[in-house]
Amino acid sequence: MTEVARPRVVGPITAGHGVNEFFAIVVPPIIPLLVADFGISYGQAGFLLTVFFAMYVLFQLPAGALADRIGKRRLLIGGLFGMAAGVALAATATTYGTLVVAQTIAGIAGATFHPTGMAIVSDVENERTEGKAMGVFGFGGALGTLSAPLVVGGLAALFGWRVALAGAVALGTLVTLAIVPSLSDGGEGDGGGRETTLSDGGREFSFGGALRSVRAAVAVPVTRGVVVLFLVTLVLSLQHRAIQTFTTAYVGGAAGGSVSVGNLAFFTLLLGGSVASLWAGDLADRFDRRLLGIGAALATAGLVATTLVLTDLLGALPSIALIAVLAVWFAFIGVGMYASYPVKNALVSEQADAAYSGSLFGVIQTASAVGSASGPAIVGLLSDRWGVAAAFPAIAAASLLLAVLFSVLLVGE
């Protein structure tokens, strides 16, 4: 954190990223409970995540353009409070339809964060520090996601899923309130980034101006690198959300059906990922980012593909030993999976200019939303037909495709 150019800017944005990712992933730790309580299928449970990220597909592009128009910080703060409102509605849901509506609200609000937060980090950092800054940013998101199985899974095991979601709202709101003062001032002096202040209050808003901003987002310079990074982001997010959504269900089933055991593996997956985010972000400033992306994708593919073989080979072990092995194994999967993120974000930052950084990250994060919406739906359908384990070869295939796309970036410009 002390090595980035603008730590007093990157710090609160990173904390906000944690809140955003925490709210985004409150459903997976309680999926088995929702399936039992509402009498729904795993496909329907996966659809709750699909709805959430479908809102990202629809709203991240206009959010990025709107951020350039009215101010990134203002939109970022409003989005975090909007996500809290959506999760609060989910906590009171008595029907599956209400859960869908709650995820829709949370998704629309959540769509504002990445185009604003990533653009601010990109604007204030420089080429020597943007990899580290994106690593720190990713670390905050990983910690937020890491908190979901602890807070939501833990509270659900003790008091039920409704209390768990209410606790999530309280925690996320408190953190948001804590960072609002830091995001409301002008940041700190020039740190050598792309702009000298964080004072981005935006211009006077008008509906016509907003529409022009959305059209401007579509007009972001479409280079070969931007197109490939769009595809990299799509595939990476598909793989990422597919693993996140069903790790609890898969490991819980493999180890005897316990939700708590499944959330332990989910926790170690995210713990490995949080460490990898910082580590890979630092490496991205010192080595070829494209080669790092290829290595991380290939490692993830190998680990995910071997998961099914591992559970068969160790099936005769005592339950406690199997749980321990799976927890460690999923930590390594988290390392491979999350290492790709700061690398990819630093590559996108190379393409960004402060004048349209919000719009560019809005375009790129729309690809992330498409992948995030597709992953849980695909895994849910495969799980309904052949069981949760059947989805893991498909996830490994996505990781291989990701390695190919990073290779395309390596071959020419």
Image (tube, rainbow, N blue to C red):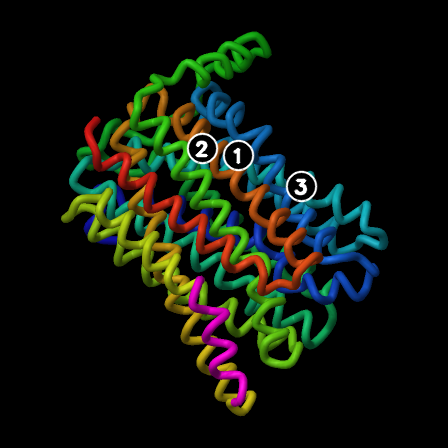
Instruction: Answer with mark 3 or mark 2, whichever residue precedes in sequence.
Output: 3
The residue stretch that appears in magenta? 305-316
Task: Please give the label number shown on residue 406.
Answer: none
Mark 1 to mark 2 CA distance (whole Å): 6 Å
Instruction: Identify residue for label 2.
Output: 115
> Tag 2, which secondary structure?
helix
Q: Is residue 324 above or below residue 238?
A: below
> Tag 3, which secondary structure?
helix
Q: Are marks 1 and 2 in contact (CB under 8 Å)?
A: yes
Front-lying residue, 56 or 244: 244
| Residue positioned 57% across, 32% down in the render | 57
Instruction: Identify residue for label 3.
Output: 51
Location of residue 200 in the rendering, given as x and y in whole percent from the top left corner: 39, 26
For badge 3, the amino acid type reads Val
Task: Please give the label number shown on residue 112.
Answer: 1
| Residue mark closest to the camera, 3 vs 1 | 3
> Tag 1, which secondary structure?
loop
| Residue positioned 20% across, 35% down in the render | 126
Front-lying residue, 82 or 246: 246
Mark 3 to mark 2 CA distance (whole Å): 19 Å
Location of residue 74 in the rendering, given as x and y in whole percent from the top left corner: 49, 31
Location of residue 246 in the rendering, given as x and y in whole percent from the top left corner: 59, 61
Q: How many marks?
A: 3
